[in-house]
Amino acid sequence: MNGWNEKKSVAVIEETFKAGASLTGALRALVDTFGYVDEAAMTPLMKTFARSRAEVLGVISYYEDFRQSPPGRHVIRLCQAEACQAVGGRELTRHAQEKTGLALHETSPDGALTLEPVYCLGLCANGPAALIDGQPVAQLNAAALDTKLTGFEE
Amino acid sequence: MSTRIFIPADMLAIALGADDIAAAIADEAKKRGETITIIRNGSRGLCWAEPLVEVQIENTRMAYGNINKGDVSSLFDAGFLTGGVHEKSLGPTEDIAFLKSQTRFIFNTCGLYEPSDVDAYMAHGGFTGLRAALDKTPVQIVDEVQTSGLRGRGGAGFPAAIKWRTVLGATGPQKYIVCNADEGDSGTFSDRLIMEGDPLRLIEGMTIAGLATGATVGVIYLRSEYPIAKTVLETAITRAHAAGWLGADIQGSGKGFDLKVFVGGGSYVCGEETALLESLEGRRGIVRAKPPLPALEGLFGKPSVINNVITLCAVPDILARGGAWHGALGVGRSTGTMPFQLAGDVKYGGLVEAPFGLSLRDLVENYGGGTRSGLGIKTIQIGGPLGAYLPPSTFDTPIDYETLAAIGAGVGHGGIVVYNENTDMREQARYAFKFCAIESCGKCTPCRIGSVRGAEALAEQVPDMQLIEDLCEVMVDGSACAMGGMTPIPVQSAIKHFPNEFAARQRTAAE
Ligand SMILES: Cc1cc2nc3c(=O)[nH]c(=O)nc-3n(C[C@H](O)[C@H](O)[C@H](O)COP(=O)(O)O)c2cc1C
Ligand code: SF4
Ligand code: FES
């Protein structure tokens, strides 16, 4: 994913609409393509799906996945749900926050890293679980997370 | 002859390095001049043994558990290609006690072959149910499902046949089969395992539901946290088409069914069936008022069956073996098997498919083997984030819908999360409110505001227990769906079974 592209975004919206997708389907396609939904997509979305600006914004803001600003170059999504809590998920999240200086939902000022919560990845017998740059990780611990973070800096 | 080696490609195995292991085994074989065929199968559900590598030796599969890259050369040294013993040997897979003692039919073939391999699926009995359904009238199919006693595995336990009959009886040019694959409950992963491991079973189940009700289009509403499932399902759909098991004319019967995958937006409440429909239609995932029932006015206002993945995956065998066979499994009105999922601080976590009627102790102690940490068990939470916390004193309770309801708990989607003795129950109760506050769709004030107030109250040094009881009461009475209506279950069960932990205390609750 390398930045918003006006022309491409319009093509993505048209393509999903033609394929019979709903507004949520188009937003999914935009996020999958660009990592977020840029403000510039508003007008084509409104026109294509015949929805008001408030409606489109309402849908975007409702869903956790439909970010309105680009994520960091790396994204760590740490599971916050019960089965991971039972094996130290809370402590791991606290460690990640201390180590990175980021709160959940926050992106570092240099755009390098985003920390996000996720509520269950279906890896619950082998927690704590995370998605790191889209890759599933299980039985995660502080040391392994630190190694990942160091890897990002190189 | 080339030796067949099975290395799962489900999300958990991959999370634990299965791709690297597959590459390392291929490299090592080349180096040693061995001819092997690597098959990336689905998971057998033995999460505690993942990555689980199996070698086919004649008709037996020999298992090697918890394999990592560093084990590869010693596996070759030990002669694992001919079943040689290694420190990670688990013996023949079928003889592993965790697996052998289960009664599997839904998960019977999951993990035996490459997930979308139509020929392999058929060689293991796949599409027999659909073939049987093609020879029946819609009413006969629904009757078979009714005889089976199958109840919904998504959480509410509603009889599948009643929904199907309603949709069958509804008139309209278009009807839909919607598969609920939102699997939002923490501690559950059975939908994921079967979609990633045996997707053709889901396709078969949905197609039978279509034949039973007159629906020709199906949609799988898949949560975005399961990216691998999406790829596997789409491949399976393509291959089922190519083999004539989907499309306008299934196996020359003149009957048609088609289906596609829709990926959600990361919202728990979109697992609630009407919020799910809103989401599919392109709106905010706000719960709809019922009536109208989705069976009469569902997706795009058309009659729709909405069933969980596991419910639909039980259907092929019901048609193949008959409803009476299914009805004889289990106890009372809880017929069939339930794919339970053991999670959290448990030594042997994974999927246990067993008929209803076994006890919590059977699951947690006999299958689960106690905690992974080695600490004592303090509590289990059964049925996801809206499920009850139960203490060990209840573990002899047999699991079925009615008996669990009698102790204030529910089967839900079959998730069981084990917690050790260091668990802070007040913190767990506070999390239940907090999760509700995060995920509430916002329609009902008690759910939207009550959850926030409840989480705040439990963070106080001296929680106002009367306020918490009052909030729970209002949420139960004033919520339009189980999100607000059942959040009080984890809260109140924690209070009931662990009252001491809700007394005043010195340190404030940790964030
Ligand atoms: C907040 C909430 C979340 C739910 N999440 C799911 C889910 O993730 N998967 C599911 O199958 N059912 C879920 N349900 C239940 C569905 O509303 C519905 O009962 C189910 O999909 C029906 O299928 P079944 O009869 O086969 O179980 C949820 C219900 C509520 C209230
Ligand atoms: S109970 Fe909560 S989630 Fe359910 S409809 Fe009301 S506000 Fe929405
Ligand atoms: S609870 Fe963390 S993966 Fe399921």
Image: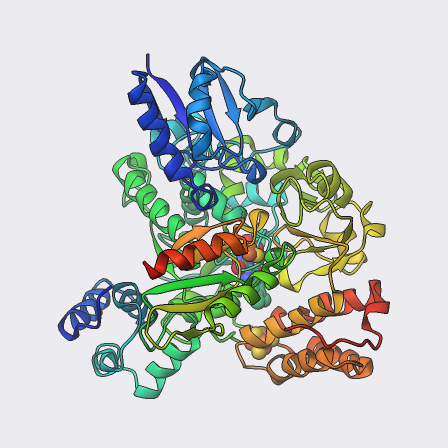
Q: Is residue B224 left or right of residue B1?
A: right
Q: Relative to B335, is A109 above or below?
A: below
Q: Is residue B478 left or right of residue B270?
A: right
Q: Is residue B7 left or right of residue B152?
A: left
Q: Residue B258, position in %: x, y?
A: 32, 49
Q: Relative to B420, is B61 above or below?
A: above
The residue under the point 62% across, 38% down is B353
Decide which of B223, B123 is in the foreground and name it: B223
Q: Residue B412, position in %: x, y?
A: 64, 55
- Any part of residue B361 in sight: yes
Decide which of B244, B419 is in the foreground and name it: B419
- Any part of residue B204 in sight: no
Q: Residue B40, position in %: x, y?
A: 38, 33
Q: Quadrant of residue A19?
A: bottom left
The residue under the point 25% across, 37% down is B242
Q: In the displayed orientation, state which residue is furthest to the left.
A: A7
Decide which of A60, B53 is in the foreground and name it: B53
Q: Residue B174, position in %: x, y?
A: 35, 60
